[in-house]
Image: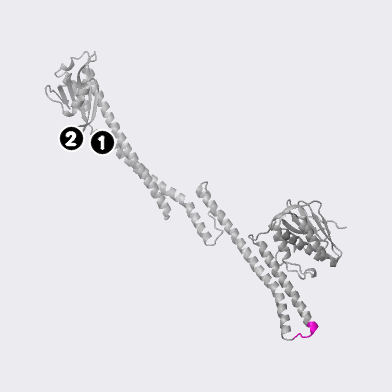
Amino acid sequence: MKSKITRRLAGYFALVLLAFSLVIGGVFAALVQRQAVEKQRDELQRYAQSLADILGSPGSSGLGMNGKGGTMAYLRFIGDVSDAGVWMVDAVGAPLSVSMGHMAQSIEGENLPEALLPLVSQVLRGETAFSDALHTASGADALAVGVPITTADGSVMGGVLLRAQSDHAPAAVRGGLFMLLISLLTALTAAALLAVWLSCSFTRPLARMKTAAAALAGGAYGARADVHQSDEIGELADTLDTLAVRLEEASRESEKLEGLRREFTANISHELRTPVTVLRGSLEALCDGVVSDGPKVAEYHREMLGEARHLERLVNDLLELSRLQNRDFAIEMAPINLLDPLQEARRSAARLGQSKSVYLEMQAPTPLPFEGDYGRLRQMFLIVLDNAVKFSPPGGCVAIAADSEKIVISDQGCGIKEDQLPHIFDRFYRSRSAQNAGGTGLGLAIAAGIARRHGMEITADNLPEGGAVFTFRLAVPMAPESGKCP
């Protein structure tokens, strides 16, 4: 009950139940009172009809019967049974006798109470008349019924009027309302306890979700609501748990990216430090006059130029890799034949392999329609072919095989060490062999970035007979195959 929403729900339940009780009580009182009035009216009508039937029966002496055993006895009997006043009138509406409780007397020539006069006119027309808007001499509410006295031939010879107080109808209503009140209080007490329990049950999952959300806001992404309900609250809890899972994954990814960033910073610092140190040392030696011999100075200049070129290549590769990793960096996609940039890259790599007599063979039986950036694809193929030529032995062969599903580039070099295979596409990861002395460790990372932007998958493996194989999968993944050199 410390929860505001719990108290509010319990209050709403209480208001609804109270309104329900008031409506039920009011409707019940009205219906009971109406039923009591109708029941009393029916009883009065039955008594009046019985008296009229007796007075109008063929065996009776009619309205003229007087004396102890005549009309007065009937009137007194009906008055005692019905606890009502009984009046008898003749065919013209003149009162003949009256019975008030245990007394019955003749009142010929006297006047009827004014409240009964409207009923007399209806009774003399042969109709049964009712009125519930009457009052006795003491001011109490009263109910009156008039019944005609008819002969055997149907003519009206007079009428019987009964008037009774309706005090017992409110008494019956009060008794019923008292019992109803006791029942409603009992039901309200039980309903209030049930309302509190239901309110707590309703708000319990909300409290758990609040706790989980607060934990997530504090960075505890392992928090879960763990609410399992087949309703909107359950769906909200599932959504919150899904959000928590994704936040946890994002947190792990952020930590991983932060680690990669630190590693990248360390790697690039290391890669930049070497050429900068060489340049600084060479310049200091030249400026301080430590080196003054002409050939030695020229050697220092050539060394500085080489380091500057290496530094330039490193910076260009970093910029290229950064562009490829930026999803907003657009590449020019156009319908091309994928073999065209592959052929151009092969020709460029062939010139690089002339010094080692490395031969590049290409097998591509049919054109490969493709949509991509011609220049980027040529760069991607050239990076891989350059590595293949670089690690091939003198007189070796680089085989290129292409079909509609994949492009395979294999060489006859020393292959890739098994512990290096998972990392060769990482930034700044490079072989420390003599063939790769001038590498920056970014070429294959750039090639992988270009492949991803074109929906390709690039993988590396070793051939059973020796050498490395790079596979560009265009559609259906297949096992790498090597080309055959003559």
| Residue 148 seen in the current view | yes
Image x and y of residue 139, in percent: 18, 35
Decide: few, some or many residues near mark 2? Use Cα within 10 Å; few <14, some 14-19, many ≥20.
few
Residue with the mark numbered 1? 171
Image x and y of residue 202, in percent: 46, 49
What kind of colouring is applied to the model shown?
one colour
**Residue 14 on the magenta span:** no
Mark 1 lies on a secondary structure that is helix
| Residue 227 seen in the current view | no
Quadrant assignment for the C terminus:
bottom right
Mark 2 lies on a secondary structure that is loop
**Residue 293 on the magenta span:** yes
- Residue type for callout 1: Ala
Image x and y of residue 76, in percent: 18, 23
In the image, residue 317 above or below residue 51:
below
Query: Which residue is at the front of the view, 215 or 356?
Result: 356
Query: Which residue is at the front of the view, 235 or 368?
Result: 368
- Residue type for callout 2: Gly
Image x and y of residue 481, in percent: 80, 55
Compared across the picture, whether 45 is left or right of 92 comes to right
Residue with the mark numbered 2? 139
Compared across the picture, whether 47 is left or right of 362 comes to left
Query: Which residue is at the front of the view, 168 or 127?
Result: 127
In magenta, the rendered stretch is 290-296
Q: If you read the primary sequence from the N terminus, does the residue marked by circle 2 or circle 1 appear first? A: 2
In the image, residue 372 above or below residue 179:
below
- C-alpha distance separating marks 2 and 1: 17 Å
In the image, residue 341 above or below residue 269:
above
Instruction: Give the residue furthest to the left.
Output: 109
